[in-house]
Amino acid sequence: MEERIQKILSQWGVASRRQAEEMIRLGRVRCNGKVIELGQKADPQVDAITVDGKLLQLRSRPQPVYLLLNKPAGVISTRHDPQGRRTVMDLLSPELRVGQGIHPVGRLDADSTGALLLTNDGNLTLALTHPRHSITKTYRVWVEGHPPPAVLQQWRRGVILDNRKTRPARVSIVDQNHTHTCLEVILQEGRNRQIRRIAQQLGYPVHQLQRTAIGLIQLQPPPLPEGCYRPLQDFELRFLRDQTDRIRIQESSAIKE
């Protein structure tokens, strides 16, 4: 059965859908010896598809992998880093690093820590990183100073970033000391460095930021140590699949309208 080649690459764990599209744009993907164009279709059971000269073979299709990682600070949320910095892939066992097509779902900036999903399921990655359909993400955020209720209410209502207002957020005080305040922040979107930029804009810069949960997928209990990972449990996988099913229904309804 013919399908778009970027979809085939994501289904087979070669890369996420967006990464596969970029590979195609760069001319790294061929079908039957010819460089392909974005959107071109093929049948992996009939056509010879290669990436960087390596043949995609039916028997080489990896088993689906779904992991939760507790990312430490200083680690980059990507498969490869041109500057040679440590990436999340360096935290995985050798058998998971190569030939499995595992990649991070979304990103945490280098200075942030906490929950990050890793998978070789390209369709899941595409659904969960779609900017219109982000699932809730929970953060513990230490900020400098003591933001008053009016500032927290402004954050909850939304703040203008890049000429566009952020979605409403849940923001509450968890703890305070003489110099800092710990906030719990729950978002339904994930713009680049969003929490850090909002906190800076409001006058209370971030001192420390940890993502504690992605939907109902949590770092604890039991505690998952920094730098460690675990397979997702059955109920967590059901949650993610329910989310992707909901997204498909929404997109199908939008097309019909």
Image (cartoon, rainbow, N blue to C red):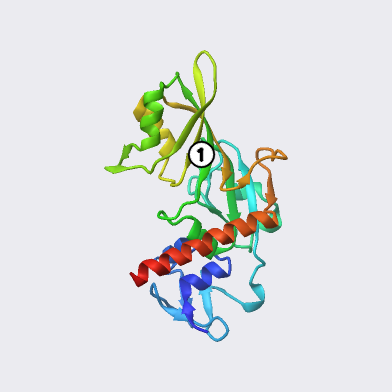
Answer above or below: position of 255 versus 168. below
Please state the total of marks drawn on the protein image: 1
Q: Toward the viewer: 50 or 142?
A: 142
For residue 126, side relative to residue 90 (left or right): left
The residue depicted at 45 percent of the width and 46 percent of the height is 188
The residue depicted at 41 percent of the width and 53 percent of the height is 131
Q: Quadrant of residue 71?
A: top right
Q: Quadrant of residue 150?
A: top left
Q: Residues within 10 Å of mark 1 (few under 14, many from 20)?
A: some
For residue 212, side relative to residue 27 (left or right): right
The residue depicted at 45 percent of the width and 69 percent of the height is 28
Q: Secondary structure at mark 1?
A: loop
Answer above or below: position of 238 versus 200. below
Q: Can you identify the residue that label 1 sits on?
A: 110
User: Residue farthest to the left?
Assistant: 163
Q: Toward the viewer: 65 or 166?
A: 166
Please say whether residue 9 is visible from this viewpoint: yes
Q: Toward the viewer: 257 or 105?
A: 257
Query: Which quadrant: the C terminus?
Result: bottom left
The residue depicted at 41 percent of the width and 21 percent of the height is 148
Q: Position of residue 20 (x, y in %)?
A: 47, 65
